[in-house]
Image (tube, rainbow, N blue to C red):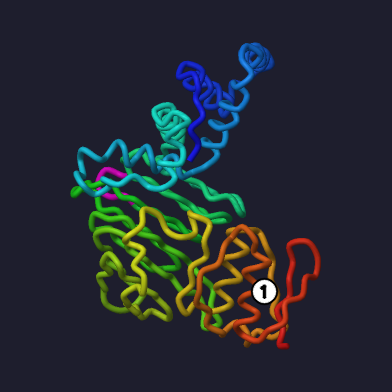
Amino acid sequence: MSTETFDARDDRAAALWADEKQGDGWTPARQAALNAWLAGRPDRQRLLEQHEALIADPAVLWAARRAAHRTAKPGVFASPPAWVKIWAPAGLAACIACAALFGANSSLRGEMIVGRRGVPQAVALADGSAVRLNGASKVRVLLGGTERRLRLDGEGFFEVAHDAGRPFTVEAEGVRITAVGTRFNVDSLETPDGPMVEVVVFEGAVDVTPTKGRVVRIRAGERGRVLKAGVQRASLRQPEAKTDLPSWTRGWLELDETTLTSVIGDLKRTTGVEVSLSDPKLGRALVSGRFSYENPENALAAIARLHGLRLTRKDAGHYLLSEA
C-alpha cells in the first residue's frame, strides 16, 4: 500500500476538477484554468490522474453506496472492500465525494442504460438502488409509483434499496426476478440448448419466475439457472455471497460447469475478444475454473489445454478453437 503524502486541499481540488471534466460544460477557458492550477505544484497532475481513474472505475460508486448505507444496515459492510483500502492513502473522503457526484449525475427514471463492450458501468438509480452493468449489456429502467421494473439484455449486478410498496423486478429473456431485499447478479447466456438466464444471489433472496412453471426462491449463496422454462437451483461451491461484488467486476472469469458457448459470449462482452468454434458441438463442453480477464488469450489457452483443443489466433482479438 502506498504511503506517499499529499496536500488535502489539492486532493479535493483534483477531485472536483476530474468531476467537472466529465460534464458537458467543459470549455477551453476551463481547460486553461485547469492548466494554470496544474502548473502550481508538480504533484497536482498525479492527483488529477488518480481521480480521473477513480471516476472511470465503476467500483467507486459502490464505495459511496457502502458508506451511505452503513447506518441503515449496521454490520453488513463493517469490513471495507479491498479496493477501498488500496485507495485510502489518496484521500478517501475526496474519492467518495467524487463518486457521489458521479452517481447523482447518473440517476435514471424510465431510461435505457447501454454499456460499451469491455467497459463495465455503474449507475445509481433515483430510488437509491444501483446497477453495475457488464460491457455490451443494456437495461431499461422504469421507476413507477407502485413498482420498479427493469428489463435486462446481457449481465448486471443489482443492489436494491428497500421499498416494500414498490417491488423491484428484473426481466431477462422472459424470466422475471423479483427482489426480496437483496443484492444479486443476472446474466443472459447463449448455450447450445438455447438461451439461459443465470441468477446468483449475494444477499437476501429473489423469486425467479420462468416463462412457464412455478416460482422458485433463490437465497444468498445459491445459483438459479433457467433453461427451457425450468429453474435449476444449486448451492455455490464457493458462495459469492461472501464477497462484495461478482467476480466479473473484479476482473475474474469464475466458471462452474459453464458451457464453452457461454464462456465465449462472456469473453466477447467483457473483453471484446471474438472466438469461433470449428464445430458448434464443441460449445457443449463444460468449463470450470478461475481465469483473469486481463489476458483473455491466456484464459483461452488454459481452456483449450483442459479440453484437448487447439487455439489459433486468426488476427488481433479473434481466435479459433478446434479439435486438436
Q: Is residue 205 magenta?
A: no
Q: Quadrant of residue 301?
A: bottom right
Question: Residue 99's x, y, as percent?
Answer: 44, 34
Residue 142 falls left or right of residue 102:
left
Q: Main secondary structure of the magenta part?
A: loop
Q: Secondary structure at mark 1?
A: helix
Q: Amino acid at mark 1?
A: Ala
Q: Is residue 180 visible?
A: yes
* Residue to which mark 1 is pinned: 301
Q: Judge whether 208 appears above or below 87 on screen.
A: below
Is residue 142 visible in the rendered image? The answer is no
Q: Is residue 147 magenta?
A: yes
Q: Quadrant of the C terminus?
A: bottom right
Residue at image position (41%, 62%) is 186
Q: Is residue 88 left or right of residue 178?
A: right
Does residue 178 lie above or below 130 as drawn? below
42 or 103: nearer the viewer: 42
Residue at 60% over, 50% down: 116
Q: Residue 322: horizontal and vertical position, in percent?
A: 72, 83
What residue sits 42% from the left and 58% below the top? 246
Residue 201 lies, in percent from the top left, at 32, 63
Give the magenta-colored segment's residue range. Answer: 143-148
List the single residue furthest toward the right: 315
